Image (tube, rainbow, N blue to C red):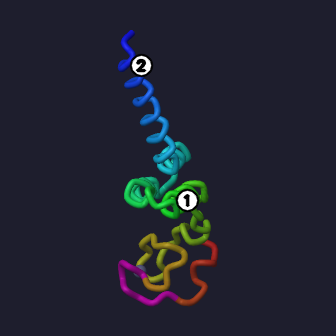
Amino acid sequence: MPNWVDRATDDLMWIAVILVLYLLPAIVAVSRKHRQKIAILVLNVLLGWTFVGWVAALVWALVKPARQPVTQREFRRCPYCAEPILAAAVLCRYCDRVLPSGWGAARR
Ligand SMILES: [Zn+2]
């Protein structure tokens, strides 16, 4: 094999290694099925060349996004119009009535 082919293969290998290292935050985010993986990828690609941007993207990729508390995602029926609305709602989105405080905490 000619010498230049060896060198070209070496160069390509190094480019691949550097590319994988550079995109590590995005790879981590995608493999962890991070909810903000697209935003992390954008930050990684655009600001990864600044060391701070790369570290920020990596930390972001490793941080588990906070899930909404279950009570906030629960639905309850509006006491006025009976449409299902979030238990944490203060205003019904169907009938526009202000809900009594603590109504969502009550059992269905
Ligand atoms: Zn309502």
At a point 37% along the width and 86% down the height, the residue shown is 96
Residue 19 sits above or below residue 107 on the image? above
Q: Quadrant of the N terminus?
A: top left
Q: Residues within 10 Å of mark 2 (few under 14, many from 20)?
A: few
At a point 51% along the width and 46% down the height, the residue shown is 24
What residue is disc 1 on?
55
Q: Is residue 101 left or right of residue 13?
A: right
Q: Is residue 86 left or right of residue 11?
A: right
Question: Which residues are drawn in magenta?
Answer: 92-99
At a point 46% along the width and 46% down the height, the residue shown is 23
Query: Residue 17 at what x, y percent from top left?
Result: 49, 36
Q: The disc labelled 2 sits on which kind of residue?
A: Asp
Query: Residue 70 at what x, y percent from top left?
Result: 61, 66
Residue 16 sits above or below residue 65 on the image? above
Q: Quadrant of ligand 1?
A: bottom left
Query: Residue 91 at what x, y percent from top left?
Result: 44, 85
Q: Quadrant of the C terminus?
A: bottom right
* Principal secondary structure, stretch drawn in magenta: loop
Residue 39 sits above or below residue 95 on the image? above
Q: Nearer the viewer, residue 59 or 93?
A: 59
At a point 51% along the width and 52% down the height, the residue shown is 34
Q: Is residue 108 left or right of residue 9?
A: right
- Does the residue tagged 1 have its C-beta within 8 Å of any atom of ligand 1? no
Mark 1: secondary structure: helix
What residue is disc 2 on?
6
Query: Residue 90 at what x, y percent from top left?
Result: 49, 85
Query: Within the magenta stretch, is there residue 25?
Result: no
Mark 2: secondary structure: helix
The residue at the far top in this view is: 1
Rendered image quadrant of residue 102: bottom right
Mark seen at residue 106:
none
Residue 4 sits above or below residue 94 on the image? above
